[in-house]
Image (spheres, rainbow, N blue to C red):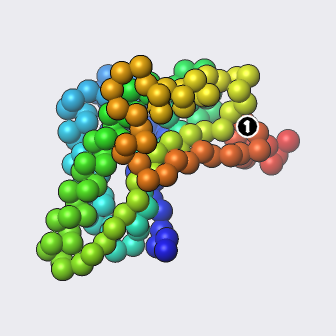
Amino acid sequence: NLKGMLTTSSADGENEILTRKDKDSSCYPKTQDELKAYADYIYHMIFDTIEYFDTYEIMNEVNISGPINHLNYKTPMMEPNEYIAAVKTARESADKAVSEYNKIHGTNHKIKILGGALAYVTWEESNTINWVQNLFNPTEGDDLGKYIDGFTYHMYTNSDMPEESVMT
């Protein structure tokens, strides 16, 4: 019973909470301080929207990088271990938000956390297959499956931006 789904960040780096001070084009949390800020962001986002959404997609298209008009398909915005750490942080914060919301409001809300949210790119122009394999079979640490209820993959028909593919 899907009430709605919310993606927890944008790919364009416009999220001030997650924009790195060194402006390395990444809006995703990598340092301990950034992970703490991200945990707070997730907690409040879920606590404030749980009446409307029951499914949350963690981040967006971290398997590519660069500004929207010059996407880099070979270099991910986050390495698999960084993404797993961020999803673990999100899961823990989400579970806390749901528990506290239910306790305060006398409700029994449940949510789902989706991982991946990967951009489709052809295998020839990316390292996505290796990147995904490292999510679920890392050389060290936890695998992504421990923290998610589902995995998403954006299956566009080509790797062009939608606006460009319609206009050509």
Between residues 167 and 94, which one lies in front from this camera angle? 94
Q: Residues within 10 Å of mark 1 (few under 14, many from 20)?
A: some
Locate the C terminus and report the quarter of the image it occupies.
Answer: top right
Where is 31 relative to 114, above or below? above
Residue 93 placed where, x, y %?
24, 50
Residue 143 placed where, x, y %?
40, 34
Residue 12 placed where, x, y %?
49, 39
Q: Secondary structure at mark 1?
A: loop
Where is 45 relative to 152, above or below? below
Which residue does the image show at 73% across and 22% down from the upper left? 124
Where is 167 relative to 74, above or below? below
Between residues 30 and 151, which one lies in front from this camera angle? 151
Between residues 136 and 57, which one lies in front from this camera angle? 136
Q: Which residue is mark 1?
A: 160
Which residue does the image show at 68% across and 33% down from the upper left? 121
Q: Residue 139 sits in which quadrant? A: top left
Between residues 77 and 102, which one lies in front from this camera angle? 102
Q: Hey, what amino acid is under mark 1?
A: Asp
Judge left or right: residue 110 versus residue 40.
right
Which residue does the image show at 20% across and 64% down from the upper left? 99
Where is 143 relative to 110, above or below? above
Residue 114 placed where, x, y %?
46, 51
Which residue does the image show at 36% across and 21% down from the upper left? 140
Judge left or right: residue 73 versus residue 101.
right
Judge left or right: residue 153 versus residue 122.
left
How many labels, in total? Answer: 1
Can residue 73 be seen in the rendering of this structure? no
